[in-house]
Image (spheres, grey):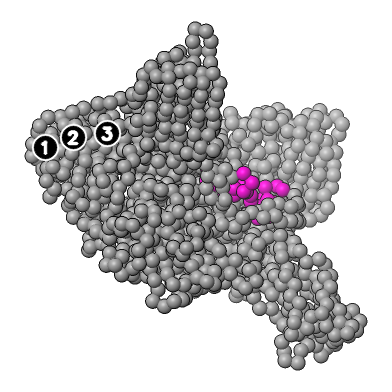
Amino acid sequence: LELTYPRIKKCDEALASPLPHTAFTSSSVFSSGYTPGYAKLNRRGGAGGWSPLDSDHYQWLQVDLGSRKQISAIATQGRYSSSDWMTRYRLLYSDTGRNWKPYHQDGNIWAFSGNSNSESAVRHELQQGIVAHFLRFVPLDWSKEGRIGLRIEVYGCSYWADVINFDGQGVISYRFKVKKMKIIKDVIALRFKTSESEGVILHGEGQQGDYITLELRKAKLLLQINLGSNQYGSILGHTSVTTGSLLDDNHWHSVVIERYRRNVNFTLDRHTQHFRTNGEFDHLDLDYELSFGGMPYSGKPLGGGRKNFKGCMESINYNGDNITDLARRKKLDTSSFRNLSFSCVETHTFPVFFNATSFLQLPGRASHNTLSVGFQFRTWNPDGLLLFSNLDDGTLEISLEDGKVVVHINVSTASRNARVDLVSGSGLNDGQWHAMRLVTKENFAMLTIDGDEASAVRSTSPLTITTGGTYHLGGYFLQTLLPPSQRSFQGCMQAILVDDQPADLHAVEKGTVGAFENVSLDMCAIIDRCMPNHCEHGGRCKQTWDSFSCTCEGRGYTGATCHTSIYEPSCEAYKHLGRSSDTYWIDPDGSGPLGPFKVNCNMTEDKVWTTVMNNLPPKTAVTGSSKERRTVLQVNYSASMDQVTAITTSAEYCEQQIAYSCQKSRLLNTPDGTPYTWWVGRGPGIQKCACGIDRNCTDPKYDCNCDADHSQWREDSGLLVYKEHLPVSQVAVGDTNRPGSLAKLTVGPLRCQGDNNYWNAASFTTPSSYLHFATFQGETSADISFYFKTSAPYGVFLENLGNTDFIRLELKSPHVVSFSFDVGNGPVELTVHSATPLNDDQWHRVMAERNVKEAVLQLDQTYRASQLAPAQGHTRLELFSQLYVGAAGGQRGFLGCIRALRMNGITLDLEERAKVTPGVKPGCQGHCTSFGMYCRNGGKCVEKYNGYSCDCTDTAYNGPFCTRDVGGFFEAGTLVKYNFMPEAFAGASRDSKVVTLQLTPHEVNLTKEEVAFSFSTSSAPAILMYVSSKTQDYLAVVLRHNGSVQVRYNLGGLKEPFTIDVDQRNLANGQPHSINMSRVNRSISIQLDHYPPISYTLPEASDTQFNQVKTLFLGKVYETGHVDQELIERYNTPGFVGCLSRVQFNGVAPLKQPAAASPASYQGKLVESNCGASPLTIPPMSAATDPWHLDNTDAEFPFNEERVIPDGVNRDSAIIGGIIAVVIFTILCTLVFLIRYMFRHKGTYHTNEAKGSGESAGESADTAIIGTDNPETIDESKKEWFI
């Protein structure tokens, strides 16, 4: 509803161009061609614009618009074809050409940015539209190459309003058409201006006690409204709301009050407060009339000594009636006015504004023995110099110290020094006008504050002064023998009296009297920085002239504006900070409106329980209640209902025990079906007791034990677990009034477990994926907190854009998190640098806050960066786009997990949004905790965002789960060689060095070995494994002629190698066999196949160190150094023929890289195969337990194709095996395409899962086993005995 500014279609007419030259005036003129009349936009008359005589801060250009106009925009331009322009300026406005008001924006006196050349015009729309008759442009900075040069335009439209002048006596009465009014809806609008700080603007009342009053109190606007209290007076209807400040500045302020029932919008100068009135009533019952300008005249003394309004009002509207127009047409009672005037009578005050570098020097009487000074002042600072004067024989100082006025008079004569100190007043730095008067005569001094003669302070100590004749107000910067204790003052003064004469400030302005420096004349640029109050959550606002601060003690919040909670949101969060069970303060909505409260946290091994106690004692006796008059027991909790609801909403599970012990007291057994007793939560209950649900009640006819109506004590109890209906807030009991009826009620504490908000997460699996939410509303204060984990080096966590404003949180590099935003003053970026990489796949916590005072970024509660907001500038963050989480408009996308994302106290439901977004998955498990068991044979589980993977590097296995043997088929003469020493082979590549570092030089002398492998062969003898050294030491595992296995250790100290015959059986029988062997010093343990391990001990004479290990051979020895000749002669030819699998020697798997890296090499024909593996089949994972069922579209195929069919193998078996392989391959391919077609799924997924296992689990166990990539699958195509 726009009543204050009646607008034409568009208020954008050029107002300055049509004006005559005489409408433009200025502080000075450079020369005749530079007069202010030439300062019109795009005109080239005269010298092409206005320039002042001196380019300094005392210059101004003034425009008289002819009458009051509504102004929507201004534009400036430099002087035509010159180097003269202004780069920064202020705008002042006034109705009278006096008492200027600076244009305010974002809580500050606004400085507009000006021009950067002489031709282009710079236009600024005024956020706060203003109504003015006169405008003044005050240059602050100008061109460095030239001087101040200016052409201007003002845009707006005509403005007209009925004005009424209130003299402090007269009141306008608006009589209702009927005697009593019951009003459900009100709209009251008006504009006022006054220099008084007190006064009633409107008042109406009714005989039932309803009333509405709008009045000024201490220059603030107070609205009091009462729609009626109830008959007992227990619920009072009185509601009072205060808004605004410094409203006695004699400038126009607009007020709109909109009420519908109990909802009220109270708007002052476009700042709206929404509130609901107290009480239970909706109608405003008024009698007879509504009065404007004061209380109605009734012969009674004015209630509470309230003053009438003195000043002007215009555009008064009440529910569609134009009150000012009705008064002008004499339709209303205005008889109380002595002289009713429809124009505004201006007051003739002349305020002076001082900043920290100003002074005003005024002349007084010289060489006089009486001194008298007085003035009014207003300030926010507790300290400052108000007045200083050098007397003929001493000094006079009047200053403000800690909000009190202090006078120091020092007189030093040849005979003695005299000093008089006077102190009066308190809290005078409250922004209000205060009057000060000091009179000194011979042996007498008197200080009066605010005209209160009764509490004036007098001094009668002997004192004679002689005046010096000049007075400095608001600052004194000269050197003097006795300098003042304060040097400057920030604030305003007016009504200055010097030696009983009013100071002629017009003469001072013209420069004919006194002197001044950096003083703004005829304006008071005071700002209340605590209105509107930026301190949140009840923080107390304190201000000085330049800034404000918030006191947050005892509120549970911290930060420059008491925005951020100092407590964690839940017990779950405390557990993950390593806290044990205890009572804690929690704040579930962080910076939201809910305050912190205490709960009990019980940290168990797997769950965290939050307990909220209530005030109902256990087994509370209930008597004398009937079905007609039930006893209602209120159950109050240690937290408010909203706070408890916050716990239950985010909890995974809640429960509350309720027990009803009864003796002849029924619960549900009523004739009409209405229960006798029930509990009230947040929703309906099931009308059955626990025994009725479990069907084990005392009397099976009833659903409750108590309904049997027995005279013995019975009990109905149960757990209420439907959390949406918890907690129990009251219990109504209705059957304890019969003889012998007794009941006892117990309501247990509310217990909740888990915190869904804390674990609400999403996993971003592709760089282009993001989630979008509604625009973030954080205009003046915004806080964002979340956890993230990633292995990516960079990515944008979230971003929200406006026209130019934006807010963004980003991982800039593996060590840097950045928080950047722009509220209109240019981009600001805060960064924190972490000492350790942040892409370590661990959870990290980020907290960012931005308010009108500062911006803060915190990482892991260890690193913190902050930056103060500029003293003047834009403060509102205006965003329009959606909020993007996980990318910035698709750029620099984040790969990883984000969890517990809270913005201004609201947790965003990432999981819900992720369910419908491609490339984003709901939740983010630490997958290894869930699925690490699937990584077999020593494989390490590695976290991934779309699952997990198994790192098989340090094992002799491959495959998605480290279950596929790495093996090879050896032909006669094939050997695999692995060099342990880097110098043992020439031309070592960079890759190979990485591998050789596995055994650093000090490890080449071994005192323990771990050996494991499996083999299958039909031919003996053969050397299975031989480890040589640069000395005569060696280790050998050989197949003797009879097929039995022998282990030989030669570590020195013995004449013959130490020989172990492991088993006498013939193992060259074509079946797979496995050997696991370990030695620690002298102890050797060997396990063959699945037989129990057998221990052996090296003889005492033997050395225990395997010195300078050099090379490991498989299948055949080809060593240039020292070897055991007997071994070579008996077992080395023709070499091993068969399969060797999963060979491991002290963490080295020589068969894993025989082709690629230099440490391992091979000779002869070696075909990759797992034919040496033991025939153990492991059942495939079921579809139910397989976490990535159906997502495995990029996995490897499970069976091993031979790369080379070796010579010497039966061709038929190879062909048959090949056919079988092709058939299986075709079947699997068909299945893959079918399943992909049936389960088409957006997004990208990668897993190393076996292809067959998940997809075939549904068809049959057999196909699943065939298809599983399991460790023991035997390759059918190797030899005829496998077919």
Mark 2 or mark 3, which is nearer the start of the sequence?
2
- The image shows a total of numbered marks equal to 3
In depth, the one of 832 and 766 nearer the eye is 832
Side of 1051 relative to 388 (left or right): right
Q: Secondary structure at mark 2?
A: loop
Residue shown at the point (36%, 39%) measured from the top left: 524
In depth, the one of 1109 and 840 nearer the eye is 840
Task: State whether residue 1100 is above or below residue 2.
Answer: above
The x, y position of residue 921, in whole percent, is 53, 61
Q: Nearer the viewer, mark 3 or mark 2?
A: 3
Residue behind mark 3: 506
Mark 1 or mark 2, which is nearer the start of the sequence?
1
Residue shown at the point (19%, 49%) measured from the top left: 65
Mark 3–mark 2 Cα distance, whole angstroms, equals 26 Å
Mark 1 or mark 3, which is nearer the start of the sequence?
1
Task: State whether residue 1027 is above or below residue 668.
Answer: above
**Residue 255, image quadrant:** bottom left
**Amino acid on which disc 2 is placed:** Gly
Residue shown at the point (54%, 62%) measured from the top left: 239
Mark 2–mark 1 Cα distance, whole angstroms, equals 9 Å
